[in-house]
Image (cartoon, helix red, strand yellow):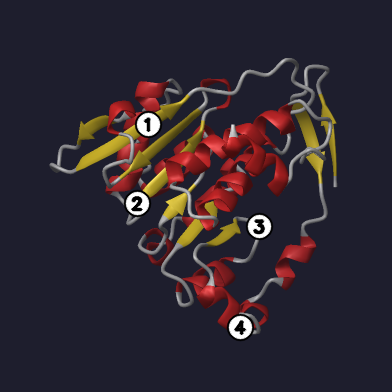
Amino acid sequence: GAALMYEKGYKIIAISDMGVNQEISPSYLQKYEKDIRAAKIVTFDANIPLESMEKLVTYSQSLWFEPTSAAKSVKACTPKLLNALTYASPNIHELLAMLTKIEPSYNNTGTDIPACMQHSTALLEKSAIQNLIVKMGSNGVLLASTQPLSSPENTMTSTSKSGNTYYFRHFPPPRVSRIASVTGAGDSLVGATLWAMSNGFSLEKGIEFGLKAAKLSLESSHAVSPLLSAGFLESYHEK
């Protein structure tokens, strides 16, 4: 694949051959059923076929959906997937696309933190998703959860019209000296968050690791910074 970037690191257009993703078929996944069932969290993105996404529902009760793009994010808006996902990590545009797919009359298009809390509440109300990790670009990350968070001092709460309480934590964006490229920052954030969770850290701590990885990506011309490694993340934890 290739991407054309603005001078300040923002993507204009990308071209990729996505055909290889069609090879991740239900029958292909079946070959690795034992490994998938053994995984603590199974992560998949919207590039694979819908039938493969729904096949994963039969293998794992801890699924993380990475929407990839606003256009592709709506693939997960089927009853089977919405009732099976534990985590989803959309950006604000993907979150709005999913919401309007589920509820076409939804017309709140705000992108600030209070609006993002409202969007997150709406999606949590209409699905079985327990944790939304919403990437808000220069506004940082918003965690929205159906369960109390591990840091009450940083938690905001909201009660829906139906009486459900939701818990939120805002993570400020990392300080970046110069943005070389925004491509890959979201994937780096999710990857490092999952690495941390697989090593026993909480989701909230994982997002802190993720933001460190996103900072590396933003400062690098590579989608994934060559500096990103388990050793880098471990050294951050030791500080």
Q: For mark 4, what is the residue?
A: 30
Mark 3 vs mark 1, CA separation in Å: 29 Å
- In x, y percent, where is residue 212? 63, 32
Q: For mark 2, what is the residue?
A: 130
Whichever of callouts 4 and 2 sits on the residue coming sooner in the sequence is 4
At x 77%, y 57%, the residue is 18
* Mark 4 in CB contact with mark 2 (< 8 angstroms): no
Whichever of callouts 2 and 3 sits on the residue coming sooner in the sequence is 3
Q: Nearer the viewer, mark 2 or mark 3?
A: 2
Q: For mark 3, what is the residue?
A: 47
Quadrant where the image shows the C terminus: top right
The local crowd at label 1, few if under 14, some if 14 to 19, many if 20 or more residues have their Cα within 10 Å, is: many
- Is residue 22 depicted above or below 184 in this figure? below
Whichever of callouts 4 and 3 sits on the residue coming sooner in the sequence is 4
Mark 2 vs mark 3, CA separation in Å: 22 Å
The local crowd at label 3, few if under 14, some if 14 to 19, many if 20 or more residues have their Cα within 10 Å, is: many
Q: For mark 1, what is the residue?
A: 169
